Amino acid sequence: MKIRLLKSKAVKSLSESIADNLSNYRNGNFNFLVADPSNFFEIDSAFDELQLALIDGTASNHKEVDCCLAMNDALGFLSPYLARDPRLWIYLTHTFLLEYSRNRWPIPENDQDAITHIRKHFFAAGTRGIERDNAASRLWWMAALCSRVEGLTLKEALTSFLHQYDVRANIVERPTTSQSIPIFSAVLKKLDASYKADKKLFEREKFRAVMKELNLQGGVKLLCALEEDKIGEIVDSCMQ
């Protein structure tokens, strides 16, 4: 089916009605959004909705790698520009991925906490909201980031990237690392090698020390201008 985006007025209405729709978020649905064509518009690009049905992680079993792979299979062809449009992801978290979103990010019992939680994971505000918080878009962006690594399959890159939250956070919170393909690729390949061996690089203090030293090296050398193999040598030296 063709990709649909919520119209801005529908997004505004949903955002202002979270408290009134708590029962829908907890165990109901938003079929009224689909039933009324005035709530959305289609673009001339189709996707396989059956792939989205494979996204089924829960709070106790995230299945992040599988979910990212399924999202990539369904919508990996999106341009970064379209992938930054919150209207796409808000539509999906309220329709195709509603069940996944509330299973993966269980809604708190306290109503006020629930409103804050829903605004974070079912909507999308700003770059952080799109890339890290929205239940659906975060899967796309993690897959897009890992797909840039040459020499590793997407599954291998995602497995290493998602193996430990603290490691992932240390990478994405450093723009120099996450936004430079050579640096990100070099780091992910070292993580992949460690994952397949002793996993020592995933130790919290060990990886933080490596990233700190890499940042210091970056202050002396322009890392982004170096070849990936040279960056790999620097990462190796940081690990000593």
Image: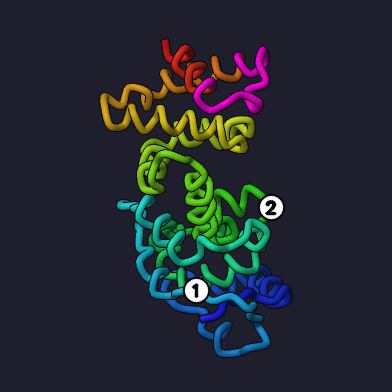
Asked if residue 167 is positioned above or below residue 8 in the image, the reply reads: above
Front disc: 1 or 2: 1
- Residue at 48 percent across and 14 percent down: it is 238
Asked if residue 222 is positioned above or below residue 57 in the image, the reply reads: above
Q: Which residues are magenta?
A: 217-230
CA separation, marks 1 and 2? 25 Å
Q: Which residue is mark 2?
A: 126
Q: Main secondary structure of the magenta part?
A: helix
Q: Residues within 10 Å of mark 1 (few under 14, many from 20)?
A: some
Give the farthest residue toward the left: 197
Q: Is residue 93 left or right of residue 162?
A: right
- Residue at 63 percent across and 30 percent down: it is 176
Asked if residue 79 is positioned above or below residue 175 in the image, the reply reads: below
Q: Position of residue 233 (x, y in %)?
A: 48, 17
Asked if residue 99 is positioned above or below residue 44 in the image, the reply reads: above
- Residue at 26 percent across and 24 percent down: it is 198
Q: Secondary structure at mark 1?
A: loop
Q: Amino acid at mark 2?
A: Gly
- Residue at 43 percent across and 15 percent down: it is 239
Task: Report the front residue among 225 and 176.
Answer: 225
In this view of the protein, can residue 152 be seen by the observer? Answer: yes
Give the farthest residue toward the top: 240
Q: Position of residue 11 (x, y in %)?
A: 67, 72
Q: Which residue is mark 1?
A: 47
Task: Report the front residue among 12 and 131.
Answer: 131
Q: Is residue 223 magenta?
A: yes
Q: Is residue 28 magenta?
A: no
Q: Position of residue 2 (x, y in %)?
A: 55, 80
